[in-house]
Amino acid sequence: MEIKEKVYWQTTIQMPAEYELQELPVKVDVAVIGAGIPGLAAARQLAKRGAKVVVLEKNSPGWGASSRNGGMALTGIKLDARTVETRYGSDLTQQLYEDAVASVKTLEQIIKQEGIECGFQYTGHLLLANKPAHYEAMQREAEWLAQHFNHETRLIARDDLSSEIGSDVYYGGLVDKESAGLNPAQYVSGLAGAASKAGAVLCTRAQLEHIETIPGGFRLKTERGELESGQVLVASGGYTSSATPQLQRRIIPIGSYIIATQPLTDELAHQVSPHNRMIFDYRHYLNYFRLSADNRLIFGGRAAFFPETTRTIRESARILQKEMVHIFPQLKDVGIEYAWGGTLDFSFDLMPHAGQLSGITYALGFAGHGVALGTHIGIRLADALLDGKVNDLPYAKYDFPTAPLGLYNGKPWFLPMIGAWHRILDWIQ
């Protein structure tokens, strides 16, 4: 079977073409940079509250990671709660994790309010232990979550893991039933429609080139012309550019790659994932996988750290298929139909960030947790911006670091070293 180098999710939708015809407004209250999930969620909320909003997008709505991800709406953030508490204390950790759990409910509410058909379903997620020590860490995390947040998870011992996954390579797992799955391209397409219906102007092919501070706000130069805005909200994720250099050097663009098999039989799909969980493992160089609505196994991972190119997509497809067959030998004869890549926004501290820097508002650093949390933070940030309370958000209460010694200007020359370091961590931890 010839592999199509296309995003499988994007083949299930047709984005409305009229967005490309939207004229660039002369003056707005808020200019949102990036028509991904956080930017569109913020734009919808801003417009619903009466603000004049434009969304400036280099490509088309949802073109980037928002439609290229695994479609997992997860309850947590990248770091485990115990690590976050050690860094920031119990009060702030409580706020962050309550928000992370609430984000899935926020996502569900938006989908219901706007009538977005995207296959949203509470499937729960399954975190898998690659080593016995990982399972021990899961036990500690489960106890901590129950004690501090009254958030119940369920541990699955290795001997019982066959009830959750058709593989014997793992050492146990943890199920959180509050996570969900959806088709991300259908969701972000529906969110774009909702933002437009609320009154936001979506301007595609309008890459931001420069921002200049002027009395009362900002002048923005785009590839389609200039406009003025009272506020600027940057939500461009891993595609954050040199137009906002102070933010670009705080974000590492990390490549993530996914393959999609041909549809599995019902019997084989049930064998692989009996409960259709959103599944991921414990490693730094992790794998993540789930079933699509038509029984394809969507299998992703950090096969390469560099952002997507034709070469990295093809190399990653080979690596991911090998990983998939190692986990599921029963899929060795199943064809791979789609392969694609996307670019995620990682911060140096692996934390999500939403706040203001030099007068510019931002929502960045979702590190693969942007489906639910990006929606939730986008809405919260929109309200905080209009109410003058951005600095009250929990995501603004800790530093947004740059690289040590200032050795990063937005061009991630160190990605090979990060990849090598993560492989070493997976070996020693």
Image (tube, rainbow, N blue to C red):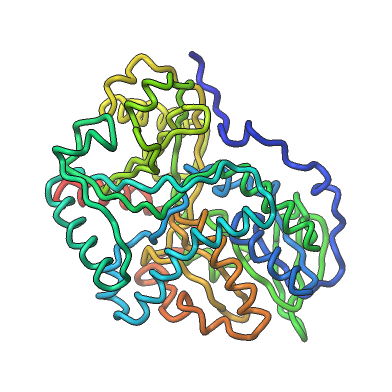
Q: Is residue 353 left or right of residue 215?
A: left
Seen in the picture, residue 262 relative to 426 is either above or below; the reply is above
For the image, the number of numbered tags is 0
Q: Is residue 229 left or right of residue 273?
A: right
Q: Is residue 137 left or right of residue 309?
A: left
> Observer-nearest residue: 374 or 244?
374
Image quadrant where residue 217 sits: bottom right
Image quadrant where residue 74 sits: bottom left
Residue 22 appears at what percent x and percent y? 85, 53
Seen in the picture, residue 315 relative to 341 is either above or below; the reply is above
Residue 317 appears at what percent x and percent y? 42, 29
Is residue 290 something that shows in the picture? yes
> Observer-nearest residue: 38 or 246?
38
Is residue 420 something that shows in the picture? no
Seen in the picture, residue 57 relative to 326 is either above or below; the reply is below
Residue displayed at 86% across by 64% down: 25
Residue 426 appears at what percent x and percent y? 21, 48
Q: Is residue 127 left or right of residue 206?
A: left
Residue displayed at 62% across by 58% down: 110
Residue displayed at 32% across by 71% down: 149
Residue 174 appears at what percent x and percent y? 26, 50
